[in-house]
Image: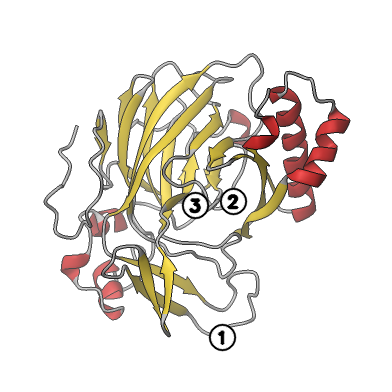
């Protein structure tokens, strides 16, 4: 285990959450942009353990001029860069990998294919007081809108509750992890972290904040959990290609859950809602998957009191289907099922 940098002046105040293990973002524990099926674990823990994982904003780490000069051009001094940024820049990046920096994996003893990895998010806190939003030609849902790159540094305000966007606008600080994932199944091979899929990945669902509970289907022994692409704020869809990309620390309890029927897709619980999802390069098919997942979930949670027809009707009259991710290959649709619908089951 590594001692927590409680006295690091770059780290804003955060609640003290006791942890069983701490995974540092460094050249050994961080890789660029893909989910390997087998990788030496950064840490191996028993089910029920609390682990803190450090994540890094990917912007500038792979810049041709190097991260120090890249961030200096944005007005960020070298002493504001986190340890590990320069050394991680030297890590290899496979041709198929995205530019995200991923930290992990966390190997959870007892997790086997067919199980569920339960991730109870206890805390997500900034490691530095600034984040980055970037877009440009060829990026986002309107790739022809801009002719040149637009990069904004957004700093946390004095109150510590939002970003000063300029023009008198404050964007609320609402940290979450854009990428949370387990190792993919054998049939998928080693896959890019860019598109969200059945193993999670770049889901970018902004409501996966502290207090949420994520459930992942397990495809490989130990589950092999990765994190990256942490955000300080985002709207559903992340339409200009990025959110506020912000280096965060992610603290969660990892547990193994046995199920008679394996999960097909990740599920989650957020404030007031259960969340199901579907992802596909075709938005229509992503929606079809998400609706089917919502139907299956409603029937299952009701103990099959609800019929498929009942659940389909409820999806239409009481479940919200939103675009969680629109810019990273696969489109992700999240279905929000109100807790109140199932309160008496």
Question: Residue 343, relative to residue 52: is it above or below?
Answer: above
What's the distance in space between the residues labelled 1 and 3, CA to CA? 26 Å
Q: Nearer the viewer, mark 1 or mark 3?
A: 1
Give the quarter of the image for residue 156.
bottom left
Q: Nearer the viewer, residue 291 or 146?
A: 291
Q: Nearer the viewer, residue 42 or 91?
A: 42
Q: Residues within 10 Å of mark 1 (few under 14, many from 20)?
A: few
**First reached walking from the N terminus: tag 3 or tag 2:** 3
Q: Determine if residue 320 is in view.
A: yes
On the image, the x and y values in percent for residue 123 come to: 35, 43
Question: Residue 147, relative to residue 121: is it above or below?
Answer: below
**At numbered mark 2, what does the secondary structure look like: helix, strand or loop?**
loop
Residue at image location 29% in from the left, 53% down from the top = 88
Find disc 2 in the rendering and name its residue: 195
Question: Residue 173, relative to residue 198: is it above or below?
Answer: below
Classify residue 4 as left or right of residue 198: left
**At numbered mark 3, what does the secondary structure look like: helix, strand or loop?**
loop
Find disc 1 in the rendering and name its residue: 147
Residue at image location 14% in from the left, 54% down from the top = 8
Find disc 3 in the rendering and name its residue: 97
**First reached walking from the N terminus: tag 1 or tag 2:** 1
């Amino acid at each position: 285990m590594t001692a927590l940098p409680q006295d690091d002046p770059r780290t804003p105040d955060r609640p003290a959450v006791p942890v069983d293990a701490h995974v540092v973002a460094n050249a050994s524990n961080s890789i660029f942009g893909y989910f390997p099926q087998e990788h030496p674990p950064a840490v191996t823990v028993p089910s029920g353990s609390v682990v803190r994982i450090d994540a890094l904003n990917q912007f500038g780490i792979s810049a041709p001029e190097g991260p120090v000069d890249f961030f200096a051009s944005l007005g960020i001094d070298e002493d504001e860069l986190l340890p590990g940024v320069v050394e991680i820049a030297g890590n290899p990046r496979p041709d198929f990998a995205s530019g995200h920096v991923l930290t992990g994996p966390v190997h959870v003893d007892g997790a086997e294919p067919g199980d569920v990895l339960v991730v109870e998010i206890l805390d997500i806190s900034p490691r530095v007081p600034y984040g980055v939003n970037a877009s440009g030609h060829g990026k986002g849902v309107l790739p022809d809108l801009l002719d040149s790159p637009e990069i904004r540094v957004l700093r946390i305000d004095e109150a510590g509750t939002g970003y000063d966007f300029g023009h008198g606008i404050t964007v609320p600080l609402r940290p979450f992890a854009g990428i949370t994932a387990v190792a993919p199944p054998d049939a998928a091979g080693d896959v890019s972290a860019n598109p969200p899929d059945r193993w999670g990945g770049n889901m970018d669902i902004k409501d996966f904040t502290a207090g949420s509970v994520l459930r992942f289907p397990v495809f490989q022994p130990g589950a092999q959990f990765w994190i990256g692409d942490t955000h300080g704020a985002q709207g559903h869809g992340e339409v200009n290609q990025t959110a506020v990309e912000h280096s965060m620390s992610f603290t969660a309890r990892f547990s193994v859950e046995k199920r008679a029927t394996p999960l097909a897709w990740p599920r989650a619980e957020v404030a007031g809602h259960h969340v199901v999802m579907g992802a596909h390069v075709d938005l229509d098919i992503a929606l079809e998957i998400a609706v089917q997942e919502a139907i299956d979930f409603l029937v299952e949670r009701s103990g099959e009191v609800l019929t498929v027809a009942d659940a389909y009707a409820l999806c239409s009259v009481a479940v919200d289907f939103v675009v969680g991710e629109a810019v990273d290959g696969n489109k992700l649709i999240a279905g929000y099922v109100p807790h109140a619908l199932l309160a008496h089951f």
